[in-house]
Structure formats: C-alpha cells, structure tokens
C-alpha cells in the first residue's frame, strides 16, 4: 500500500459510519440491501494464509486466494439459496449461522481519484453454528469506497486473515 | 479384492471413540503410505514444506542432491521442533534450544560445544541423524511416505489405482503444479466421514447439494445440449475398488460424441490428452462429469466439471487434492490443494480456479453443506447408544460388474449411487485395526 494522504476528519467519520452500517446489513442478514451498497464491479478477495519462514514475508501468499467473488457470484451463489424458497436445502446454513462484526481502526486515505477512498480497517468477526460456543476470527480489510450518485458504495474488499489454520464455523464469510 | 462384497459392519463409535483413535495412529498412520506433498511445492534443492503424518510433524524437503526427504520435525537431542514455518528454503536446520544442526539430508552435522559437553568420543553423530520416513516415493508428482520399512513399494501399494491416477494427473504434457500454499482448515469432525464421502459417494449429491443443482452448477439438459447431442436424462457412472482401500467413482455426462471430448478443458489441450491416455483411459475422461476417489487412508482427489460458475453458460474442470490429519477423534485438520496445468490458457486457468473456489474450494458452497454432514456424524457418534448402532452400507451390491472388455482395471461396477467404495474403505480399515 503506497503512502497516501489521510482524508479529512469529516471523511474519516463518513467512512467509519459507512462500514458500520454495511456490517449491520450483513449481521442482520439484509442481503438485498447489502447488495445495494456495493458497486456492480465489486470484487471480494481473501488470500491464502501461511506461516512464512522469513521475518520480512507476509502471513499470506501474495497470489493464491481462498475467496475470489464478484457481486454477481455473491448474489447468486451465496445469497440466493438463503431465500425462503431455497433455504430448506441450504443444509450447511440451516439453521442459519450467526455472524457479528466489530469494525475498528478505520483509516481513510485519499486515492488520487476524487471519487475513490482507500479505507483500511480491522475486523473481529464472531461466528456461531447452531448451539456451539461462538468462535472468533480477526482480519485486516483493504477497501475501496466509491462516491456515486447513489452515495458511498463499496467497490473492492481485500481481507487478510489473522489465522493460518482457519478455525471458524465456515470459511465462506464476508469479513 | 474379494473383501469388497464381504459383510462389513461399522458401528458408529469408529467416528468418536478415543481408543479407536489411538489405535488408528498406531495401526494405520504408522504403517500406511501417506501423501505428504506435491513435487511442484519443493522444486529446488533446499525447498521444504512442513506437514504431518498422523499427528507427527514432518519436514518434506528436497536435499542438495535433489532427493526428497521426509524428516521427523523434532531434534534428536531434547525434542524441540526444528522447523516452525509452513514453507521455505534452507540447506540446514538448527535447533533453537542447544543449537544442534542438521543437513537437509537429516544428517547431524554440528553439536554445539561437543567436546565440552560430551567429551571426546562421547557422542556418535552418525547415530543421531533426524528420524526419517523409511520410504519416500512419488507418482505424477504426488509424494508419498511411510514409516514402515516393510511396506510394499508404492507402485504395489497403489496397484490398479495408478491407472486411474494416470487419467486424472498423467494426461498433461507438462504435468500439474500446486497453486499457492495449501489452505488449512480445522474441522470438528473425525477424519473418516469426509474420506468415506470422497471415496465414491455418488448417492449424496442430489440431496446434500440440491441448492447447487438448482443454482445451475451441475450441467442441465440445456447446458449439455450446448456441448453435444444429449443421449438421455441420466448421468451414468462407475465405481472401482483397486485393493488396499483405494477407490474411485467416475461419472459421465449423457452426451453422444464421435471422439473423446474433454469438456471443461481448452480445445487445444485435447490432443495431448488423446496422446497421453490409452483408449480405455480416454473413455474414463471423455465427457467426465466428476471423478473422485481416495488413496487409503487420508488423501483424496477430485476432478470436477462445473457450469455457470462465473458467467451464464461457462464451464470448466478443476483438480483438487485434500489431505486429512487426524488430530483427535473429533478434530481434523484438512489441507486443500488446487492443481493446475500451468501451460494452459490464462483465461481458462482463471475460470477453472473460480469454479474450484466457489464450489469445492475450502470456502465453496459444496463444502459448507458437506462439512455439516461430517461434523454432525461425529457429534452423533459420541452418544453411548449411537456408538454401538451400525450404519447401513449395502448400497450398490446389485450393480453389475463392468464388462472386462471395457479395459478398466480393479473391481469395477456399473453404477455410481453406491456404497461399494465405503465398504472397501472400512473393509481395509478393519483389516489393519484387527
């Protein structure tokens, strides 16, 4: 991530509020509304975690991905089957797992493009399967927020997991 | 291979019992050949990855002569692991406790302050090399190791399974490469239910994966008609037991083709498949819908054809290997490897990768639904009454043997909604555990 200028306090607050509301839509399972706050060219990626042998290497592979999704793939392959007519057969998500996001350390930076903000944030995600005790995973998010006539929208999310062996009710999550 | 159709009674305790788990470590994981890595993960001298055989941590490394070594990851001196990263490159491993240093051949090269601590002749470095696998061998880049010096040669252990591995891994001119490091997931299930499924369970697909069917990930009649003439509504399949608990299921799309058709791969690759496969092997690959199986005990492979994964009307195949470490009766770490022919067209490589990630990848839709079954099986088996209750494993006993003329080796039957492969898995498991 190249050094860029921090956004103004007003824009910091705007970005933090956007991320809080976006998380609320996922946690409330208001999937159709969540799709309305992401751009049509939205891309969501999560790299494969790894324990490196060098102190200068990251804790993830620079190229290999665990998740690589578009707005359409999330709409069709994640959310569609959770609708009333299909949910009975979404076996792994029936009863539905519960998720809760805690979003902190929001840092909005100018991108050079007046319509786009680069926003980094930390996220703690609680996941609960059935009556199991909740489990937790943390990650850092590298988001791009875009100003559009419809307001601020999420255009890109790259989330880096803080876990080499993924121990969560399901790895198929929006971090 | 006469054990396939013998009676195999499996009580549910095999999925949850602590004593069974301990016995498995001794009887199965200390003796059987097990997959540890793919050649492409360690191409250069000094390259290593850390893995497990059973619950033991091992370093899989290519030494300076190019030989692959599987070294027990614990210092001969006082037991500290020598290697703590998932992968890297080094010619030597140095212990962090007292500094004993080993070459990547496993030989002990240096003992810190040796004369001061042990005296002259007080220690024989030749006797204190790293403990290593008795045998290491590979097929199609898949590296296997065993602790058992009396184990049969890998070739003999695999038997006819090698012929089927060739159809999946041996058809590429330049082989396959693992994409990135394997994803590692912790699953609160016994290691066997997923292995049973991947051994050849064609019965669960349209129930467990009903939403995937409805969302178009399986070729519909329309999808089929866009590829070739449709022969009928029913996908057909065969299941095979190759002895030693190695099994496979091959399901074919109902298409009529004049020549072998490897749908899901770029057309420009079809010639190399024709060249690298025998005629019966081409039949096993032509119009493949899915092929999957297991190398006993804990490695499975899957070659799957999926439709409509990124854009309406697209389709691609991908090849996956999974490996399960038995960390406890109800705790399994699974490793997920995507293998790709790196010489293929870049656009196809991307589509194939997306098809994998969104379906059978560690975060794919199929895995969300499958994993729930495996975790549930394990949880239910922990009950005292449930533990004694046998499971039903009679499916497919009436399926006719595949005619000899087909040229498919092993014990093959026509029909893929079967429990044949699961009987084979548990038959072999019981032999070893007896």
Image (tube, coloured by chain):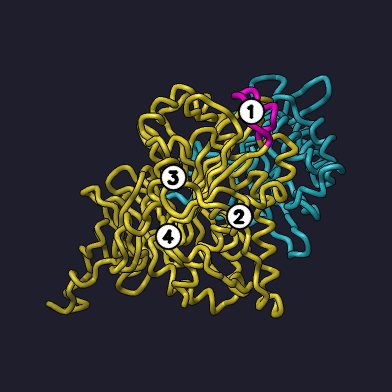
The local crowd at label 3, few if under 14, some if 14 to 19, many if 20 or more residues have their Cα within 10 Å, is few
> On the same chain: label 3 and label 4?
no
> Residue A56, which numbered label?
3
Q: CA distance from mark 2 to mark 4?
A: 17 Å
Name the tint of chain A in the rendering.
Answer: cyan
Q: Label 1, on which residue?
A: B230
Q: Is residue B146 left or right of residue B252?
A: left
Q: CA distance from mark 3 to mark 4?
A: 48 Å
Q: Label 2, on which residue?
A: B418
Residues drawn in magenta: B219-233
Tell me the subunit letter for badge 3.
Answer: A
Mark 3 or 4: the one toward you: 4
Q: In front here: B227 or B40? A: B227
Q: Earlier in the sequence, mark 1 or mark 2?
A: 1
Asked whether disc 2 touches disc 4, contact meaning CB atoms under 8 Å apart, the reply is: no
Q: Is residue B48 left or right of residue B355?
A: left
Asked whether disc 1 touches disc 2, contact meaning CB atoms under 8 Å apart, the reply is: no
Across and down, in percent, residue A77 comes to: 72, 37
Q: Kindly identify the residue that appears in the image at 77 percent across and 53 percent down.
A: A97
> On the same chain: label 4 and label 1?
yes
Q: Kindly identify the residue that appears in the image at 86 percent across and 42 percent down.
A: A85
> On the same chain: label 2 and label 4?
yes
């Amino acid at each position: 991530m190249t050094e860029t200028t921090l956004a103004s306090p007003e824009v910091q607050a705007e970005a933090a509020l956007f991320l809080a509301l976006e998380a609320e839509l996922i946690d409330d399972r208001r999937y159709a509304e969540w799709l309305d706050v992401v751009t049509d060219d939205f891309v969501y990626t999560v790299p494969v975690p790894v324990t490196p042998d060098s102190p200068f290497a990251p804790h993830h592979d620079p190229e290999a991905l665990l998740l690589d999704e578009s707005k359409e793939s999330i709409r069709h392959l994640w959310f569609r089957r959770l609708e009333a007519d299909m949910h009975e057969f979404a076996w792994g998500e029936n009863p539905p797992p519960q998720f809760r996001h805690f979003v902190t350390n929001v840092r909005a930076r100018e991108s050079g493009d007046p319509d786009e903000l680069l926003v980094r944030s930390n996220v703690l995600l609680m996941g609960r399967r059935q009556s199991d005790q909740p489990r937790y995973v943390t990650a850092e998010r590298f988001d791009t927020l875009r100003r559009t006539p419809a307001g601020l929208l999420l255009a890109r999310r790259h989330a880096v997991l803080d876990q080499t062996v993924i121990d969560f009710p399901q790895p198929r999550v929006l971090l | 291979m006469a054990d396939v159709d013998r009676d195999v009674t499996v009580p549910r305790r095999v999925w949850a019992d602590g004593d069974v788990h301990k016995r498995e470590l001794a009887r199965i994981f200390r003796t059987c050949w097990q997959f540890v890595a793919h050649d492409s993960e360690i191409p250069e001298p000094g390259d290593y990855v850390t893995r497990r055989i059973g619950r033991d941590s091992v370093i899989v490394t290519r030494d300076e002569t190019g030989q692959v070594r599987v070294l027990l990851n614990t210092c001969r001196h006082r037991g500290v692991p020598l290697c703590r990263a998932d992968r890297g490159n080094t010619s030597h491993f140095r212990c962090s406790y007292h500094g004993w240093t080993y070459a990547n051949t496993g030989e002990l090269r240096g003992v810190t302050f040796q004369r001061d601590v042990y005296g002259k002749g007080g220690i024989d470095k030749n006797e204190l090399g790293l403990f290593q696998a008795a045998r290491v061998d590979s097929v199609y880049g898949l590296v296997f190791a065993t602790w058992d010096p009396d184990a049969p040669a890998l070739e003999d252990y695999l038997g006819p399974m090698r012929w089927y591995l060739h159809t999946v891994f041996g058809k590429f001119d330049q082989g396959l490469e693992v994409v990135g490091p394997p994803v590692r997931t912790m699953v609160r299930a016994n290691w066997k239910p997923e292995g049973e499924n991947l051994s050849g369970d064609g019965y669960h697909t349209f129930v467990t994966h009903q939403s995937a069917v409805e969302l178009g990930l399986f070729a519909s009649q329309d999808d089929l008609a866009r590829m070739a003439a449709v022969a009928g509504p029913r996908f057909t399949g065969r299941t095979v037991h190759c002895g030693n608990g190695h099994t496979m299921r091959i399901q074919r799309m109902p298409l009529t083709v004049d020549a072998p058709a490897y749908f899901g791969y770029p057309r420009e690759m079809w010639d190399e498949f024709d060249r690298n496969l025998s005629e019966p092997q081409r039949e096993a690959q032509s119009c493949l819908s899915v092929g999957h199986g297991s190398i006993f005990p804990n490695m499975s492979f899957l070659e799957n054809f999926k439709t409509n994964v990124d854009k309406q009307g697209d389709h691609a195949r991908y090849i996956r290997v999974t490996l399960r470490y038995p960390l406890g009766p109800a705790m399994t770490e699974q490793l997920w490897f995507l293998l790709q022919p790196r010489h293929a067209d870049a656009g196809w490589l991307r589509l194939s990768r997306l098809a994998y990630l969104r379906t059978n990848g560690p975060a794919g839709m199929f895995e969300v639904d499958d994993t729930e079954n495996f975790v549930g099986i394990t949880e239910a088996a922990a009950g005292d009454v449930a533990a004694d209750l046998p499971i039903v494993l009679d499916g497919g006993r009436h399926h006719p043997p595949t005619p000899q003329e087909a040229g498919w080796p092993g014990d093959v039957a026509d029909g893929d909604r079967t429990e044949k492969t699961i009987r084979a898995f548990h038959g072999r498991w019981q032999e070893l555990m007896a």
